[in-house]
Image (cartoon, rainbow, N blue to C red):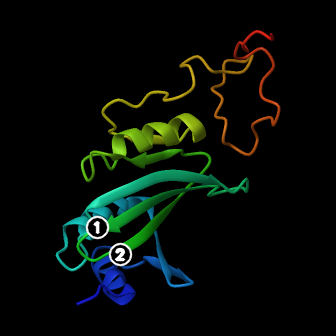
Amino acid sequence: MALSNNDIIQVAKAVAADVSVVEHHGDLTLVVKAADLLDVLYELKDNPRTTFNLLIDITAIDWAKPGERYEVVYFLSSLANAARLRVKVGVHEDALHLPTSVDVWEAANWYERETYDMYGIIFDGHPDLRRFYMPEDFMDEHGTPLYPLRKDFPLMGIPGSLPLPPKD
């Protein structure tokens, strides 16, 4: 029996009643609260009706708006059901914290580090949360850490922040 969007929604709402649903061109996205995130992810993975056993990616979106400025997006796949799903959670710009999902999927380790490095979102409980691409001391002149995929990051970069290769 094929996994329907309604089945996925029922499984998620069984553990978090206020899950919002967005469906666009047949693609399903669940929007959850940060407090419900791990419960929903565990249930989607462990419930035999859904079996979302593969984490494809974790990334963030900077909407450059006050309040819940960021959204962290989890891309999931159920190999057994040939289904894909997105789970989104809003992150307030004054509280850049989410619980780590490394205990749900070990692969989250790398994706959370990358999201931290590029957006500055902190995954509480992560076993080794440190910069992934940028140097640990990638900061502005005031000592504030810089995150290159934020909308307020200068398009031309920070002059003198990273040495450029010599010109030929």
Res 19 → quadrant: bottom left
Left or right: residue 142 versus residue 5 is: right
Residue at image coords 33%, 76%: 12
Amino acid on which disc 1 is placed:
Phe
Foreground disc of the pair 2, 1: 2
In percent of width and height, residue 47 lies at 19, 73
Quarter in which the N terminus is drawn: bottom left
Helix, strand or loop at mark 2: strand
Question: Foreground: 136 or 79?
Answer: 79
Residue 162: numbered disc: none
Amino acid on which disc 2 is placed:
Ala
Res 86 → quadrant: bottom left
**Would you name the residue on which mark 2 appears?**
83
Identify whether 133 is placed above or below 32: above
Q: CA distance from mark 2 to mark 1?
A: 8 Å
In percent of width and height, residue 154 lies at 80, 34
Question: Foreground: 35 or 145?
Answer: 145
**Would you name the residue on which mark 1 appears?**
52
